[in-house]
Image: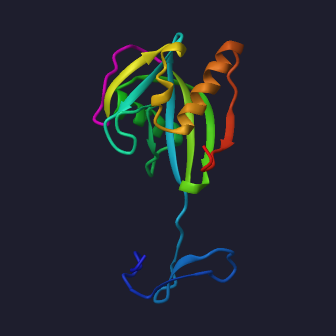
Amino acid sequence: MKFCSQCGSDAVTFSIPEGDDRPRHLCGNCGTIHYINPRVIVGVLPYLEDRIMLCKRAIEPRLGLWTLPAGFMENGESSEEGALRESWEEARANIRVDGLYSVYDIPYINQVYLIYRGELTDTNFGPGPESLEVELFRQEEIPWKEIAFPIMHKTLEHYFADSKLGQYQLHRGVISRKL
């Protein structure tokens, strides 16, 4: 950061503010502390009977690979509203949310994922501007080697394991660089 977004000054330094424990961008002119916090990604694991809806990405990162509909949460919306918005943007899908399904921290890229489980209310879906294709898959049809992100892979694995038990629980975890 070279300039303060509060006052426009170029007197920004990177140091530990008094009473804090980590370096932050500080404005020497107006005193603003600029916090840079993790990004929240929200999405839905959409299902219809024994099938899961996946979207083939039309954008980077991971262009051409499959994912659950998800993206960055926007200001002014709840995480559930954001997840439904992303499902509409990526798959034009109408979904009834069952509840929060997985929460994963990915500290090395400063992201937190909140994935809801939700039932498709109809089959009138299709690719939005960020998707090349949108399809329903049974477990044996999932293109496992073409899943775009580790979080989506883990969430799908949890879903199919929970489906066999007939019980869906909240899954939490941390994904490290080792994956």
Residue lying farthest top?
49
The residue lying at 60 percent from left, 43 percent from top is 179
| 148 relative to 110, above or below | above
Give the quadrant of the N terminus.
bottom left
**Tag count:** 0
The residue lying at 40 percent from left, 33 percent from top is 65
Instruction: State how the image is colored.
Output: rainbow
| 2 relative to 120, above or below | below
80 or 109, nearer to the observer: 109
The residue lying at 60 percent from left, 76 percent from top is 23
Left or right: where 176 falls relative to 128? right
- Across and down, in percent, residue 127 comes to 30, 27
| 6 relative to 87, above or below | below
- Across and down, in percent, residue 6 comes to 41, 77
Tell whether position 127 is magenta.
yes
Looking at the magenta stretch, what is its main secondary structure?
Answer: loop
37 or 136, nearer to the observer: 136
Residue span colored magenta: 120-130
Left or right: where 84 falls relative to 176? left
Left or right: where 79 falls relative to 6? right
Quadrant of residue 54 within the rendered picture: top left
- Across and down, in percent, residue 32 comes to 51, 79
- Across and down, in percent, residue 144 comes to 51, 26
Left or right: where 168 falls relative to 131? right
The residue lying at 55 percent from left, 57 percent from top is 38
162 or 35, nearer to the observer: 162
| 78 relative to 161, above or below | below
Tell whether position 147 is magenta.
no
